[in-house]
Image (spheres, rainbow, N blue to C red):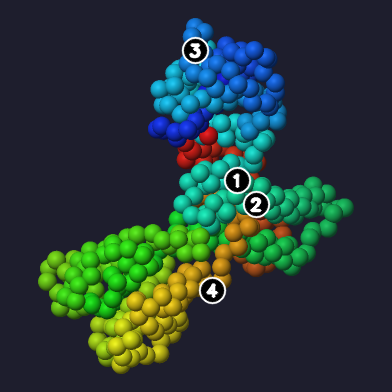
Amino acid sequence: MIHRGDTICAIATAPGVGAIAIVRVSGPDAPALAARLFRTREPLRERYATYGTIVDERGDPIDKGIAILSRAPHTYTGEDTLELQLHGSPVLAGETMRAAVACGARAATAGEFTRRAFLNGRLDLHGAAAVADLIAAESRSAARAALANLGGGLANEVRALRAWLASVLEELAATLDFPDEVPEPEPARVRAEIDAIVAALERLRADGEIGRLVREGVTVAIVGPPNAGKSSLLNALLGEERALVSEIAGTTRDTIEESIASDGVRVRIVDTAGIREHADRVEAAGIERSQRALQSARLAVLVFDGSQPLAPEARALLARTEDRARVAFFNKADLGEAGVCDVAGERVVGSVRDAATLDAIRAAIARVGWGGSAPDLERPHIASALEFDAVNGALRSLGEAAKTLARGEATDFVAGDLQSAYAALGRVTGDEATEELLDGIFGRFCIGK
């Protein structure tokens, strides 16, 4: 069991050799540990970096380094903290960590520093989760999106919606408690307020889906008939010879996945085996994987040989993907345009050897992949599966309330559903956080954060 009154410690830098290593301490005994673990000619000054000698529990020197002692509540965790900076040797960091434990500290669990920041009111729950997203960011856009969530803007927005729900609930409660003095609210007005809250939550959910794509990357499946230039397109977008290219049809037998950054956004590209009717057993297995990749990708880039009339397989692929997000690329147009035709949605005509064509394909991927508009990375958004679940739960409850009013039942019958929605939104802000919810969020963190 984790005790909040413990003093915790952890190595806060990444494993391995580096320029510096940092051992972090937080809790009521941090000043006492500073006195035992650090030797200097002058007393430590709060929030000042002081040079001296880091020692073990017996007073034997470990390394020369820097200590920074900070006092609650103006620290990351809201507690007294000590940071010891030493040379970046894993052995020295481990010895300092061992000495801190020997002096009474406890090794921190994953995410415990940030968990204490939340419990002590230094971060809201959404901002705490954003710290993990910021650490795990794999692209500039993912880092920007996580940084936007650190400011607490989402919690303020959700709290405003909860306050709106609370005002409706208070009015209904007053109607029940004082029926002679307080008239029942008009069902049409209550329905209008519910609809407005639903619209706001649906926008939050849509923004959250875009945020998920920013963090995880937009999956793009490159599909098409054999020998159309799919692997050549992958290599051209990556800027390296990642996939084997050959004039022999059916060279690609399996899916190949790589990532690129397009305007700071991660794009996961899957090159697939050529789709055709007549294939041997091994090639057929590759084609089956191509079909699965096509179904699971957010966006399909269809590659055709634009210099030749389209084969039946190519026309069937165009027809099968007509209702999904796609970009049709007619390659080898420098050799002729016999296969180029009008298609629904985005179309690019050119050659993988042409830089302007590649720029057009990247631009088309961005337009279609984001649903026609670039994501607003400065706006806070719901990020975790737990937050999505809470918002979806609130929407379900509000939907039930709307159905009750549509049936013409008494207005006070919606109170239970509104209360459920109110509680669900509290899980987003952390106002009604459970231990299970906290464990799920902070379990994503590394030790020392």
Q: Residue furthest top?
A: 58
- Tag in front: 4 or 3: 3
Asked whether the residues under the numbered discs 4 and 1 touch, taking CB atoms below 8 Å apart as contact, a structural biologist would say no
Q: Earlier in the sequence, mark 3 or mark 1?
A: 3
First reached walking from the N terminus: tag 4 or tag 3: 3
Looking at the rendered structure, the secondary structure element under dot 2 is: helix
| Residue ID for mark 1 | 126
Assign a secondary structure to mark 1: helix
Asked whether the residues under the numbered discs 1 and 2 touch, taking CB atoms below 8 Å apart as contact, a structural biologist would say yes
Identify the residue at image location x=59%, y=13%. 39
Q: Are marks 3 and 1 in contact (CB under 8 Å)?
A: no
User: Which numbered disc covers residue 61?
Assistant: 3
The residue labelled by disc 4 is: 372
Q: Determine the residue positioned at 39% across, 59% down.
A: 259
The picture places residue 152, in percent across and down from the top left corner, at 66, 47
- Residue 65 % position (x, y): 55, 22
> Which residue lies at the image location 58% right of the left edge and 41% below the top edge?
128
Q: Check disc 2 and report the residue beneath it.
A: 154
Residue 182, visible in the rendered structure: yes
**Amino acid, disc 3:** Pro
What kind of residue is marked 1? Answer: His
Q: Position of residue 398 (x, y in %)?
A: 62, 58
> Going from the N terminus, do you reach mark 1 or mark 2 first?
1
Determine whether, in the image, residue 268 is placed left or right of residue 165: left
Mark 3 vs mark 1: give the one in front. Answer: 3
Q: CA distance from mark 4 to mark 2?
A: 24 Å
Asked if labels 2 and 4 touch by Cβ distance under 8 angstroms, the answer is no
Residue type beneath disc 4 = Gly
Q: Amino acid at mark 2?
A: Leu
Q: CA distance from mark 3 to mark 1?
A: 42 Å
256, above or below 357, in the image: above
